[in-house]
Image: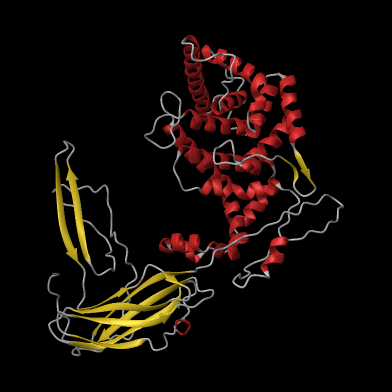
Amino acid sequence: PPPPPMAESAPGQGGEAPAAPPVRRNLKETVFFFPELRTDEEGNVIIRFKMNEALTRWKFLAMAHTQALEYAISENEVVTQKELMVLPNPPRFLREGDEIEFTAKVSNLTDKKMAGTAELMLFDALTMQPIDGRFGNEKNTVSFEAEGGQSARLAWTLTVPKGDVLAVTHRVVAKSGSFSDGEESVLPILTNRTLVTETMPMPLKGGQSREFTFEAMAKAGKSNTLQNHNFSLEFTSNPAWYAVKALPYLMEFPHECSEQIFARYYANSLAASVANSNPAIQQVFEQWKNSDALISELEKNEELKTALLEETPWVRQAQSESEQRKRIGLLFDLNRMGYEQEKALAQLAERQSEAGGFSWFPGGRDSWYITQYILEGLGRLRALGVKDIQPGTQAWNLAQRAAEYIDREMDDHYEQLLYEVKQGRADLEDDHLSHLVIHYLYTRSLFKDLPVEGKAAEARDYYLGQVEKYWLNKGIYQEGLMAITMHRHDKKAAADRIIRSLRERALHDDELGMYWKYNAGFYWYQMPIETHALMIEAFSEV
């Protein structure tokens, strides 16, 4: 049991009840974490902190050590409490249309009986406007009695409204004489609905007039449960704008795997190149960065982000355009870009092993594919004219070591094939073109000024010969890689054959343009958008 309280005064005696009872809001479970404290000359340490407001039992842990690695560990418990405590017991979230009993507990830690009132107040979490009426909480005050050292149960019946209330702030305040306590927290309100987005591209050429029928919208009126949320029309005269809008996604991706660290480097490098290429573009992004774009109050509350923003994705729609512009403006801030580039590049350099390879996550084994993926990205940036990837730069040194690593991997791969042939288990004339080998040939074609030496050069020449024989057995994505690779190695006839075949198998549509039918999948060489982007690259280069 908790230690006995320090009595303020007997219930109902000594002073008047405060006009506005204090409400506890900081309910975080960790009070502080100080990883590096130093003692004074006498070995004393003073820890200064502000206590959190949750009424509970806390564990204090401390570890001290000397330069000689002598150490000591201390563990204690601390209890925070009041003579009168109110402890709400809310659910994790609310559902639209639910009827619930919202409960709380009032604890009397004095040795005398307490009688008082408790009030439940509800507010819109975004505007902090009272919304008790919408929850049927007009009679929000209840009475309670609690003997000394005992607790009393409180309960309110609520009906969760359907509508635009995304989160509710609940505040429970209890008063008895000169004693009072209050606690406030936030609950997300989730819906049973699922957002379904129907889209229809409407491509038009200059001077063209066409009529379109949106079948999904025509069918929407026949549903009894469907609720229309939003109808929007997007127009851009330059589709490259959509690529610019996607850059913040690469910049903000949360995971710390190697390819996503590189994605941040790629986004910032590309953004810097775009901003530096045209002063007028830079001025527009600067205006966006400094605009009074809407900042989501929901995103400031970490407890709500996962439950609410992911369960109700349309929350973002009202703010999407202004906030998106602000994020793009921040991305294109030159000072910030320079810092983010250096940070991401330093992380990549730290991740690169002595052999020159990259693992997917720290501590893992070097991955041939991940290393090729990063090297391919560096090559693409270089081809786009990004100046940071030139001989003598840190990025160039990173690329050089990665190229040496994948050359060794190709060497080992080819040696294993020769061993299988020697054992009579394989034939060099058969098809040995794997997805990884084709990707290697393409990636290496981006760095032809870095020499391929030893068995790796022999392997490259062998597999280039395999491309000429077996290109038609591969998928659309691999054919695009092979066409570009053969073109860069001056094997024009083979490259032209592949492009001619792709052109013959292409489908043409007034709305969709030129496209291919194939089985999409989850592998890196089966993604529809990546495949079509590669087709554009192949047809523009070859």
- The furthest residue to the right: 207
151 up-or-down from 308: above or below: below
- The furthest residue to the front: 424
The residue drawn where x is 49% and y is 66% is: 297
Q: Quadrant of the N terminus?
A: bottom left
Which x, y percent locates residue 40? 18, 49
Residue 321 vs residue 283, the one in the foreground: 321
Which x, y percent locates residue 16? 25, 89
Residue 153 vs residue 67, the one in the foreground: 153
- The furthest residue to the top: 422
**Left of 102 or right of it: where is 375?**
right
The residue drawn where x is 76% and y is 28% is: 500
Q: How many marks?
A: 0
Residue 319 visible to the viewer? yes
Residue 385 visible to the viewer? no
Which x, y percent locates residue 475? 63, 32
Q: How is the image coloured?
A: secondary structure
Residue 340 vs residue 423, the one in the foreground: 423
Q: Quadrant of the C terminus?
A: top right
The residue drawn where x is 41% and y is 68% is: 93
81 up-or-down from 245: above or below: below
Residue 464 vs residue 146, the one in the foreground: 464
In the figure, residue 321 lies in which quadrant? bottom right
Which x, y percent locates residue 163? 54, 75
In the figure, residue 495 lies in which quadrant? top right
120 up-or-down from 536: above or below: below
In the figure, residue 225 lies in which quadrant? bottom right
**Left of 96 or right of it: where is 328?**
right
